[in-house]
Amino acid sequence: MAAITSLSFAALTNQCSDRKLSVSSTHLVSNFDACRFRLNQSCDMIGVRVSTHSSSSRLVVRCMSSTTDVPTVSQTKANFLQAYKRPIPSIYNTVLQELIVQHHLTRYKRTHCYDAVFALGFVTVYDRLMEGYQSDEDREAIFRAYIKALQEDPEQYRSDAQKLEEWARSQTVSTLVDFSTKEGEVESILKDIAERARTKESFSYSRFFAIGLFRLLELANGTEPTVLEKLCAALNIDKKSVDRDLDVYRNLLTKLVQAKELLKEYVEREKKKAEERTGSPTANEAVTKCLGEYQHLGL
């Protein structure tokens, strides 16, 4: 079980041997300024920009403001544990604890602004991570506790992710990449991201954002490298960074599948041992009963 409990999200930045699940967790945070950020540039402002196409189309962008104190990583983790007090199996808890650290560093980075693609990326990671969890109700309760610990809205994360997923399913590869020529709520979201990325204003690239892009292409059946290159160009995003972070994501999924398989084998083995232990007294009782009947018959 040591190999299972040592699996971590951050650990997957290192190129590790396929024979090991336990690896170092020091490099993933480098993209998030390692735990060092400035309090005088913290954020919690909400800006809303309404699309000219429709009054119902909105872009929600939350950026940092200089008036809000930034909580520590320990405070965020404590908020999560306070919001969800039930025990979480170690195979999930270890990765969740690493994940919340990375999310915290991204969330409170000076240039970070929440957007729907970022939300889609996190929801994708979370759902894949928690796939097969013992209870759907508990899985959603953990999600809500996690997002609230970061002082954000879990319903908005789910809503924005679902909105982008539904849109991507209705797109072809060409229409998805050519979002700048079209009008609509999601198209407006992507245009806004492209503009902020171009000007480097209120935009901070992150691993969750990269996974969100990949999920959009996945749903539109456009996972060819050339398609990803076109989408990155349209959004003014560095494709090399996206490729690197997607490799980390794929490694995470691979290691997680391996860990879950080991856990399943362990549980089945322990269950079998327990059945054997409980079965022995039953067998003894049957033998004793049989001998008693023989004695009663005078045999």
Image (cartoon, rainbow, N blue to C red):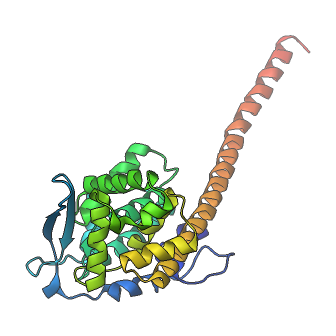
Residue pushed farthest left? 67
Residue pushed farthest right? 299
Residue pushed farthest front? 181
Q: Is residue 218 visible?
A: yes
Viewer-nearest residue: 254 or 158 = 158
Q: Position of residue 202 (x, y in %)?
A: 22, 80
Q: Position of residue 190 (x, y in %)?
A: 32, 67
**Location of residue 63 with respect to 221 vertically, above or below:** below
Q: Position of residue 275 (x, y in %)?
A: 68, 41
Pick the quarter of the image with the C terminus: top right
**Location of residue 173 with respect to 19 vertically, above or below:** above
Residue at 24 percent across and 74 percent down: it is: 113
Q: Position of residue 3 (x, y in %)?
A: 60, 70
Residue at 65 percent across and 56 percent down: it is: 266
Q: Is residue 89 visible?
A: no
Viewer-nearest residue: 219 or 30 = 219
**Location of residue 63 with respect to 256 vertically, above or below:** below
Viewer-nearest residue: 283 or 69 = 69
Task: Give residue 284's quadrant in the image.
Answer: top right
